[in-house]
Image: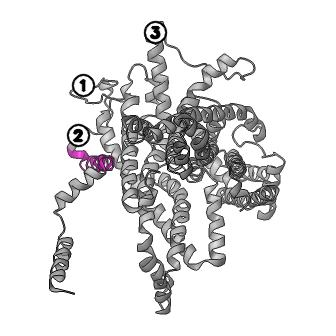
Amino acid sequence: MSAISKEVADAEIEELSVQKPWGTRMIDTIRRKPLGAFGAIIVLVMITMAVLADVITPYDPLVNAFDKMHMPPSAEFWLGTDQFGRDIFTRIVYGARTALLVGFVTAGVGAGAGLVLGIASAYFGGVFDLVLQRIMDVFMAFPLVILALAVVSILGPGIQNVMIAITIPFIPQCARVVRSSALAIREIPYVDAARALGFSHSRIILRHMGPNVVAPFLILTTAFVGQAILLEASLSYLGLGVQEPTPAWGLMLQGGAEEYAESAPWIAIFPGIAISLAVFGFNLFGDAVRDLLDPKLRDR
Amino acid sequence: MYQYIIKRLLLMIPTLFGAAVLVFLLLRAIPGDICELRMGAEGGLVDVATLETCRASLGLNEPMLVQFFEFVWGFFTFDFGTSMWTGQPISHEIGLRFELSVQVAIMATIVSILVSIPLGTISAIKQDTWVDYLVRAFSIAGIAMPSFWLGILIILGLLIGSQAWFGTPWMPPIRYVPIWENPMENLAMLIWPALATGYRYSAVATRMTRSALLEVLREDYVRTARAKGLLEKIIINRHALKNAMLPVVTVIGIEFAFLMGGLVVTEQVFNLNGLGKLFVESVTNNDYTMTQALVMLVVLIFVVTNFFVDLLYAWLDPRIRFS
């Protein structure tokens, strides 16, 4: 290699290794993915609402005030009050806690369990894979809401049981997708190398194969959060999810919302906007994550 | 094709069998048993004799295998036992509501097709223009919006709209009349839930139509059609859309199978006495036998619909049935 070309090569390597400042990179990403950035902003707003709920609103979300029932939106009550005189804005802000708790826990646990089962299924193969896949097939034959309702019918309503009911249908969905990615990875020699070195099965699954199927795993996890928020809202709306007086968006639409639809429409409108925006935000954010991690799926 | 049908039919058996085992075990996994839980939920102490009567009536004293055999046999003979809440035969309760739910499901599917195919096509043809963005926003909103909230908004819109136009608020009829008895009244009642459910399901199908058509429009044969000077309308309708419909048909078919899940919530909003509402009531009332029968029914509908979707797919795409 001549001296000049080596200099050029060194300069190029130096240029490539110097990272752009954090702010510039963020602006680049926002420009390339405006919708994803919008989704991320909604997600951030939700997280802020959940964390700083006590600071954001001066009212208590649980205390009834019968002298302030059905008040329309005003400077005092931004989004009006409900049939028990509770401030709707306050209940929406605190409701973000319930939504995010259910969303993150169910998506995390469901996708996490699916990840381990999916890789194990691909790694061990044979009878284990066959039996596990048939079990997953059975779970996949239940529509999401139906399986969740069946679980609630056994465990009873309440936030913990709802989380279990939502987590269970997520496991086979994630396991199925992760398995197909892991099948390809199993054939790569480093897995054989790890086995030859005498590593344990769990170490190979978690340390060696796990990080390589992280793309489909992350894509599914973000998609699950939106689905979980929607499912929790549906179950709570049916009276089988989170119970009063806990602030939850689906629950806010139950009872009073329909009963007073004409005289106090704000009770029905604002919690619904909160649910839609949250799911919308997580979906957009999830789409952007998918585009960044898996360019093949773009435009789908 | 016959071989394909037989293969697909045989594949249904393990899934249905597995679902039956799962549903059977689910209700027997409860600590104690369903009689204890059911009667305990009503409050107060229950004497042993009452519990024994309940167990005997449900056959819970029999060995597990016999119970499972009876459960599966009941399914084959449409004898699901009696409801623990009303005491009526379950097949009778389901029969009363089946027609309404199936009609809403079919109407919602029609709404979904009528919305998704034209919108998806326009969106693909006008890719990356404001029309495309508008359609995409419309479809993403459909996925994000809970159908029960959309239902509440429709009711609210009807009340406010009718009040403004006619001076008196109008609500859809409450009593179900079969479509062949009084089509107008039937449609006036069921069109709203069909719209609320159909819009949500159209969202996925719109996205699928768009992406499938975009893929087909980049194929060589479309370029050839353009090169030989065919009208764009003919290229889209005859060459592109026909081939793009394959994945769309699958999505619409699978959604039909999922509709039962959607109806659970929508029927509650519109106060329709269908299978979805029955399902929620049976869960609320701890009516375990009813819940068990309904879950199995939904799985059966789901598996059978998927079977027909696969057949349709194989019929449309010869590569599948000959593979």
Between the C-alphas of marks 3 and 2, the distance is 40 Å
Between the C-alphas of marks 2 and 1, the distance is 15 Å
Q: Amino acid at mark 3?
A: Trp
Q: Earlier in the sequence, mark 2 or mark 1?
A: 2
Quarter residue A26 falls in: bottom left
Q: For the residues labelled 3 and 2, say whether their Cβ atoms are less than 8 Å apart.
A: no
Q: Position of residue B119 (x, y in %)?
A: 50, 35
Which residue, given by chain and number where applicable, does mark 1 sit on? A74
* Picture layout, residue A186 above or below residue A43: below
**Residue shown at 48%/61% (left/top)?**
A110
Quarter in which the C terminus of chain B is drawn? bottom right
Which residue, given by chain and number where applicable, does mark 3 sit on? B165
The answer to which of A275 and A66 lies nearer the viewer is A275
The answer to which of A70 and B258 lies nearer the viewer is B258
- Give yes or no for residue A42 being in the magenta stretch: yes
Which residue, given by chain and number where applicable, does mark 2 sit on? A57
Q: Position of residue A190 (x, y in %)?
A: 45, 84
Q: Which region of the structure is painted magenta?
A: A33-55
Residue A175 visible within the image: yes
Q: For the residues labelled 2 and 1, say whether their Cβ atoms are less than 8 Å apart.
A: no
Nearest to viewer (mark 3 / mark 1): 3
* Picture layout, residue A152 above or below residue A177: above
Query: Chain for mark 3?
Result: B
